[in-house]
Amino acid sequence: MKFLGNILWLLFGGILVAVFYFIVGLLMCITFVGIPFGVQLFKFGAYSLWPFGHELVDRPGQPGCLSTVMNLIWILLGWWEIAVIHLVFGCLCCITIVGIPFGMQHFKMIIPALLPFGKEIR
């Protein structure tokens, strides 16, 4: 079921989300300051390719001091908009019964989109 969910996710827009994350991640990696943010966007891109059966969880010993500071910078720079986009798409997907699993995947991506540092994909 996870495989079918992931294939349908890709066909109905998941590939666009992943490509967006990868392109913006590459742009962020142009400067040394942007590399940590680009790495987080690559993590989101990989997660958004195959979200069914995977989750983003806190790494052991997290959140640490550096992760907290980087998450604060992430929010202050306006990356919270990613969470708002996932919220809107999650609500839109949940309008129909067929779209509810896809909406739930968007809702799962909200917290990591707000606080990405210190997370890993399982």
Image (cartoon, rainbow, N blue to C red):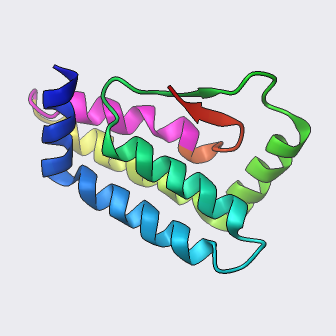
Taking the magenta stretch, the answer to whether it contains residue 103 is yes
Q: Could you tell me if residue 77 is visible in this image?
A: yes
Q: Is residue 65 left or right of residue 32?
A: right
State the residue in front, 108 or 52: 52
Q: Residue 27: x, y in percent?
A: 55, 77
Q: How many marks?
A: 0
Q: Residue at image x 78%, y 58%?
A: 73
Position of residue 12 relative to residue 54, above or below, is below
For image coordinates 32% across by 38% down, the residue present is 50
Q: Main secondary structure of the magenta part?
A: helix
Residue 83 seen in the current view: no
Magenta span contains residue 80: no
Q: Nearer the viewer, residue 87 or 108?
A: 108
Q: Could you tell me which residue is drawn at 52 percent across and 48 percent down?
A: 43
Location of residue 38 with respect to 55 vertically, above or below: below
Instruction: State whether residue 35 is above or below residue 102.
Output: below
The boundaries of the magenta stretch are 97-112
Locate residue 2 relative to residue 37 in the image: left or right: left
* Quadrant in the picture for the N terminus: top left
Q: Residue at x 80, y 42 (%)?
A: 67
Q: Position of residue 92 (x, y in %)?
A: 23, 44
Q: Position of residue 98 (x, y in %)?
A: 9, 30
Q: Position of residue 111 (x, y in %)?
A: 55, 36
For the residue pair 112 and 10, the one nearer the viewer reads as: 10
